[in-house]
Image: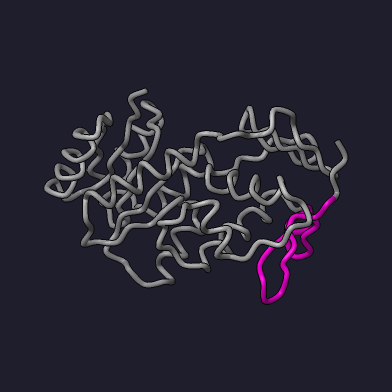
C-alpha cells in the first residue's frame, strides 16, 4: 500500500531533497512550509507519518506536535538542528516517535520513516483482548481502554505497552525495550524509554506517581504487574 508522508519544512531545498528520496522509495509526499499549513494538511489529508521541523513560521513545530497529539495518533519524526539530549527528550515528551538532527543523511531519514511505519503494523499480536484490573488492550483494533474509557496512545506508546503487557511479571531493561520497541539498529538514548514510560503512566495509571501497571525495578528497568483478569 502506498503510504503518504507529510514533510513540514520551511527550507525548500531540504523539503525537496526529502521529497525526492521518499518518492524514490514509493511514498506519496505532501509538503507544508509553516506550522499552520502543516495542521491544515494533517487534518484534511490524514498522512501516514509526519516529518516535522521545529523552527517554523506562523506556528512552532513543538506547538504543532502538541496539537496533533491531542487529536491524532499519526507517527511524528522530529527533524531539527537542536541536537542536545534535553532537546531530544523534550520532543519525545511531546509525543514524537523519533528524532533526527540536522545535518542528516536522507537515506537514514527514509530508513527511520520505514522503521516507524513498520512498528505501527501488528506482528503476531494476540487475537483476544487482554484485560487487566481496569485496563483493556485490544491489539487487533489497536485500542486501549482505562475504566472503559478510550485512551489515545501514540504508535510507539502502544507498542511499548504491548511488549510489557504480553509478558507480565518479566523485568525488561531499558536496552531490551529499545531493541523490542525501536529495533536493534535504533541509536537512541536509553532515557528515551523513561520518557515514553512517563507518558504512558500519565495516560493509563490512576495515580501516575504511584503506578499499578508499569512498575520501576530500580537499577534494572520496568515490569508490567500481573493483575490479569481475563
Coordinates of residue 52 in the picture (x, y in percent)? 33, 48
Quadrant into which the C terminus falls: top right
Please tell me whether the stretch drawn in magenta is mainly helix, strand or loop. Answer: loop
- Residue shown at 38% from the left, 26% from the top: 44
Q: Quadrant of residue 158?
A: top right
Left or right of 4 on screen, residue 173: right
* Count of picture labels: 0
Residue 169 x/y as whole percent: 78, 56
Position of 128 with respect to 89 (left or right) is right
Nearest to the observer: residue 41 or residue 25: 25
Q: As rendered, which of 39 and 117 lies closer to the eye?
A: 117
- The residue under the point 47% across, 65% down is 89
Quadrant where the N terminus sits is top left
Q: Residue furthest top?
A: 1
Residue lying at the far bottom in this picture: please name it. 219
The one of 177 and 34 positioned closer to us in this rendering: 177
Residue lying furthest left = 13
Which region of the structure is painted magenta? 206-226
- Residue 43 position by quadrant: top left
| Left or right placement of residue 62 versus residue 219 in this view | left
Amino acid at each position: 500500500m502506498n503510504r503518504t508522508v507529510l514533510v513540514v519544512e520551511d527550507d525548500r531545498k531540504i523539503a525537496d531533497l526529502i521529497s525526492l528520496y521518499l518518492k524514490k522509495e514509493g511514498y506519496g509526499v505532501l509538503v507544508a512550509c509553516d506550522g499552520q499549513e502543516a495542521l491544515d494538511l494533517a487534518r484534511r489529508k490524514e498522512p501516514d507519518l509526519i516529518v516535522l521541523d521545529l523552527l517554523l513560521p506562523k506556528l512552532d513545530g513543538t506547538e504543532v506536535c502538541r496539537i496533533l497529539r491531542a487529536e491524532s495518533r499519526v507517527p511524528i519524526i522530529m527533524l531539527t538542528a537542536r541536537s542536545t539530549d534535553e532537546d531530544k527528550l523534550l520532543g519525545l515528551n511531546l509525543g514524537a516517535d523519533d528524532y533526527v538532527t540536522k545535518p542528516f543523511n536522507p537515506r537514514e531519514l527514509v530508513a527511520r520513516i520505514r522503521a516507524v511505519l513498520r512498528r505501527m503494523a501488528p506482528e503476531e499480536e494476540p487475537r483476544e483482548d487482554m484485560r487487566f484490573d481496569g485496563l483493556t488492550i485490544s491489539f487487533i483494533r489497536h485500542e486501549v481502554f482505562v475504566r472503559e474509557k478510550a485512551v489515545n496512545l501514540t504508535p510507539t506508546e502502544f507498542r511499548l505497552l504491548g511488549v510489557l503487557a504480553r509478558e507480565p511479571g518479566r523485568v525488561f531493561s531499558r536496552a531490551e525495550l529499545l531493541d523490542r520497541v525501536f529495533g536493534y539498529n535504533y541509536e537512541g538514548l536509553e532515557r528515551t524509554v523513561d520518557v515514553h514510560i512517563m507518558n504512558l503512566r500519565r495516560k493509563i495509571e490512576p495515580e501516575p506517581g504511584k503506578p499499578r501497571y508499569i512498575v520501576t525495578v530500580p537499577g534494572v528497568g520496568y515490569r508490567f504487574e500481573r493483575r490479569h483478569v481475563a
